[in-house]
Amino acid sequence: MVPALHPALDASRCVPCGACEVACVSARTGLMDLLPDDVLVLERRRLRIRVVADVPTLDVCVDCAERPCVAVCPHHALLVRPNGRVDLLESRCTGCGHCIAACTYGAIRRVSALDLAYKCDSCAPLGHAPACIDACPSAALSLHPR
């Protein structure tokens, strides 16, 4: 079985431009000409680049072994696929926030406009490679197994 793959960041190459976050939202919405500081991007990105002590870090689901988010979801909106990927079923999500609080990686966020939780799924439901990787101008993002 092929393990779940997720975006990983080479911080030495990252120039925190926001192109990956824009590509993430554009892939889901079909909207083009978005900017990194657009409210839609800030609200609906499924991954986030943060700069901590001048070092870019990536907040993205790594399908961790502990999976505390799955255990605390009262609506069974998070499930573990056979390959280890943790998927969030938005149709079951009520936006209660338990998974957000439980995630030790800060990889699950609330989309207040939709009252849902969002997390990176490596664009798997879209049927193509993660949009963020192709959009990165410095090739700082790549796919890695958990």
Image (cartoon, rainbow, N blue to C red):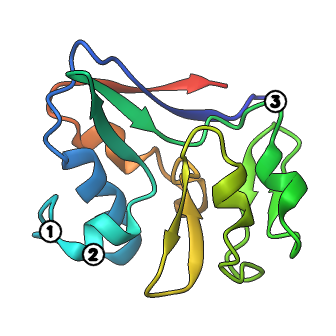
Point 40% across, 34% down: residue:
58
Q: Amino acid at mark 3?
A: Ala
SS under mark 3: loop
Give the CA separation, mark 2 to mark 3: 31 Å
Q: Would you say the residues marked 1 and 2 are in contact, meaning their CB atoms lie under 8 Å apart?
A: yes
Where residue 40 is drawn, which disc sits there?
2
Point 62% across, 34% down: residue:
62
Within-10-Å neighbours for mark 2: few <14, some 14–19, many 20+: some
x and y, in percent, of residue 141 in the image: 35, 28
Position of 22 relative to 33 (above/below): above
x and y, in percent, of residue 34 in the image: 14, 68
| Towards the viewer: 116 or 91 | 116
Left or right relative to 64: residue 107: left
Q: Amino acid at mark 2?
A: Leu
SS under mark 2: helix
Position of 44 relative to 100 (above/below): below
Within-10-Å neighbours for mark 3: few <14, some 14–19, many 20+: few
- Mark 1 against mark 2, which lies toward the viewer? 2
Q: Earlier in the sequence, mark 1 or mark 2?
A: 1
Q: Which residue is mark 1?
A: 34
Point 59% across, 78% down: residue:
116
Q: Would you say the residues marked 2 and 3 are in contact, meaning their CB atoms lie under 8 Å apart?
A: no
Q: Earlier in the sequence, mark 1 or mark 3?
A: 1
Q: Which residue is mark 3?
A: 65
